[in-house]
Image (spheres, rainbow, N blue to C red):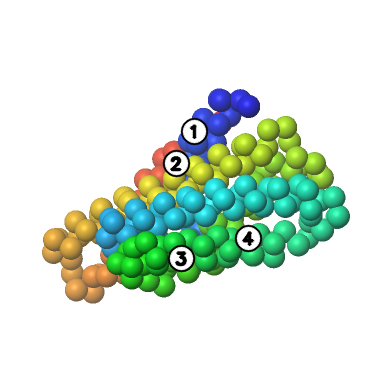
Amino acid sequence: MDISRIFAIAISMVFINNFILSKFLGLCPFLGVSKESKSALSMGFAVIFVMTSSALITWLIYDFVLLPFNMGYLRTIVFILVIASFVQFIEMVIRKSSPPLYKALGIYLPLITTNCAVLGVTILNVDNFFPGSSALPGSFVYSIFQAFFAGVGFMLALILMSGIRERLELADVPESLQGIPIAFVVASLMSLAFMGFSGFKF
């Protein structure tokens, strides 16, 4: 296991290739849950858990089931089923342990199932670490780290956005820009700011 490569993966997934601000994946929960910092933080942890767990399971399924039986073309369907299962598990846990948080997240918690960022990281792992029909050495660990830091990048974007939107509640925003319009303006400015990291090469 190469520590420098893990560090490069961390910097890349959090800043350079941030799934929300660079790849524009997962915008629905990003805009929906970022009104309050508490719900944004909770959603961030849920996405990190789902991404990391999904990466672990999908790597094993792809390497030990799909590839040996020449069924790589089924990866998208299988990955979606794995993600949906984890989201149902998370939803049940939050509903049982914290009903107020479950109510705050609302429809955006089940939307993790269709969150293209979660599916995107599992497919990115396959594309990066399975050249041809075999896994690269150490790719299992790298896949987990890549998914984890992709979730951290997702949570970072959510927290930054929620902090800005909470401050905007106290600002004198024109009526025509209140709500989602100003959120899109802020998201685009954040995306432009994160483009500054694209000059880093690893």
Q: Residue at x 63, y 27 (%)?
A: 1
Q: Is residue 167 shown left or right of residue 25?
A: left
Counting residues from the start of the chain, the first of labels 1 and 3 encountered is: 3
Marks 2 and 1 in Cβ contact (< 8 Å):
yes
* Contact between labelled residues 3 and 4, with CB atoms less than 8 Å apart: no
Write down the residue under mark 2: 15
Using the numbered discs, state the Cα–Cα distance from disc 2 to disc 1 in whole angstroms.
10 Å
Q: Position of residue 57 (x, y in %)?
A: 65, 51
The earlier-in-sequence mark between 2 and 4 is 2
Residue 39 image offset from top left, x and y in percent: 32, 60
Picture disc at residue 82? 4
- In-front residue for pair 64/71: 64
Left or right side of 190 for 178: left
What is the x, y in percent for residue 120? 59, 55
The residue at which mark 3 appears reads as 91
Q: With 65 as the anchor, is 165 left or right in this view? A: left
Mark 2 and mark 3 residues within 8 Å of each other at the beta carbon: no
Q: Could you tell me residue 8's position as x and y percent?
A: 53, 32
Q: Amino acid at mark 2?
A: Phe
